[in-house]
Image (tube, grey):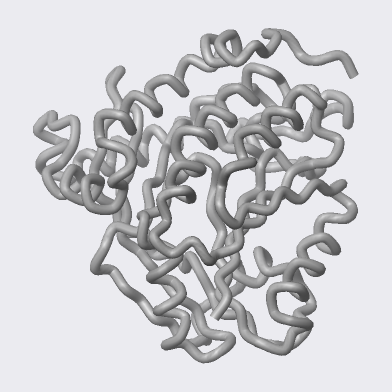
């Protein structure tokens, strides 16, 4: 069975009005939205996470047969397009897809049609963010698990490692996420793109769950994409409270540990290409995006439209 993953990297979509309590407001104009979305300092942070977390984990996959679709806006400034080409060139199975927002669904639908041989065979799909890492066995395990689920069913790998900032330190613990991270698309032309399909209500379909291994590394940096239209580097009070609650619920973290014993063991097994110390250094560096921009040769002010 074919395995296909999707990562969105700075894809522009018109921001909508959100709950004022979250500090997210509609931008005044399209120009303002683009200036914020593609601010060089913010893009430096995103590239740093992509280059230190996601791409190394894709290169380390024990099963290199998966296809990874990295979707980016065709109108993203040339400075960032060039870097994206350079950093993704050596990743096995990665296909860089550039599209305008209006063509996004059509672009993904075309790739779904290709992956399923004209919608004649089921395909196992998953999504991942540029600030995440995948265990080296992720695509291999997904391919195996997908064979146990009828088309239309879903696969869940709920166990992972959580890296976050707290008290000036990067800390790590384990997490169990009640989210479906992959699914098996039936061999029929779907009416929605596969990322929308994976986000559907899964309460009425068969689910295969394997919680026995750390499938992913989740990074919490308090910079949700939607909030970036209101402020470049927002710090969400809601997320802060969630992190504090997470720490309180883990005895080792509550006692001051930088990393729990289970998390350290999981990282050593799941991410042999990146040590726990290197992970913490990468996340810590992301908290100084100005320094990252300078190191990458990006300007510190918005690019001229």
Asked if 62 appears above or below 183 in the picture, the reply is above
Image quadrant for the C terminus?
top right
Rendered-image quadrant of the N terminus? bottom right
In-image side of 86 versus 51 (left or right): right
Q: Is residue 148 left or right of residue 87?
A: left
The image quadrant of residue 207 is bottom left
Residue at (65% x, 30% y) in the render: 228
Residue at point 9%, 33% (across, down): 255
Is any atom of residue 63 visible in this view?
A: yes
Q: Is 113 on the left or on the right of 127, as rendered? A: right
Residue 21 visible in the displayed image: no
Q: Is residue 246 left or right of residue 14?
A: left
Please tell me whether residue 118 is drawn above or below residue 258 in the rendered image: below
Q: Residue at x 81, y 26 (%)?
A: 78
The residue nearer to you, when weighing 214 against 201, is 214
Residue 25 lies, in percent from the top left, at 72, 33
Residue 77 in the image: state x and y as whole percent: 81, 27
Residue 80 image point, x, y percent: 73, 27
Quarter of the figure with residue 224: top right
Q: Which residue corresponds to the image point at 10% horizontal and 43% vertical from the top-left? A: 251
Label total for image: 0
In the figure, residue 188 lies in which quadrant? bottom right
- Residue 69 placed where, x, y %? 66, 56
């Amino acid at each position: 069975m074919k395995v296909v993953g999707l990562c969105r990297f700075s894809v522009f979509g018109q921001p909508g009005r959100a709950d004022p309590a979250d500090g997210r407001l509609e931008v005044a104009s399209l120009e303002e939205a683009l200036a914020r979305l593609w601010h060089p300092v913010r893009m430096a942070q995103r590239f740093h996470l992509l280059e230190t977390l996601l791409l190394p984990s894709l290169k380390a996959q024990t099963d290199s047969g998966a296809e990874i679709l990295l979707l980016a806006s065709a109108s993203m400034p040339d400075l960032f397009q060039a870097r994206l080409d350079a950093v993704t060139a050596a990743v096995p199975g990665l296909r860089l897809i550039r599209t305008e927002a209006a063509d996004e669904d059509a672009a993904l639908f075309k790739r779904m049609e290709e992956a399923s041989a004209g919608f004649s065979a089921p395909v196992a799909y998953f999504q991942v963010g540029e600030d995440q890492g995948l265990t080296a066995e992720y695509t291999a395990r997904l391919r195996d698990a997908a064979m146990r689920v009828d088309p239309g069913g879903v696969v869940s790998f709920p166990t992972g490692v959580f890296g976050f900032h707290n008290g000036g330190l990067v800390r790590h613990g384990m997490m169990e996420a009640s989210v479906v991270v992959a699914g098996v698309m039936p061999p029929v032309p779907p009416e929605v793109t596969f990322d929308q399909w994976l986000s559907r209500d899964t309460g009425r379909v068969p689910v295969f769950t394997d919680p026995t291994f750390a499938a992913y590394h989740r990074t919490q940096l308090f910079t949700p994409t939607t909030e970036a239209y209101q402020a470049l580097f927002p710090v969400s009070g809601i997320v802060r409270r969630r992190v504090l609650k997470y720490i309180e619920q883990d005895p080792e973290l509550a006692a001051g540990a930088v990393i729990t014993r289970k998390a350290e063991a999981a990282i050593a097994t799941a991410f042999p290409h990146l040590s726990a110390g290197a992970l913490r250094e990468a996340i810590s560096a992301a908290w100084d995006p100005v320094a990252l921009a300078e190191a990458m040769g990006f300007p510190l002010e918005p690019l001229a439209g």
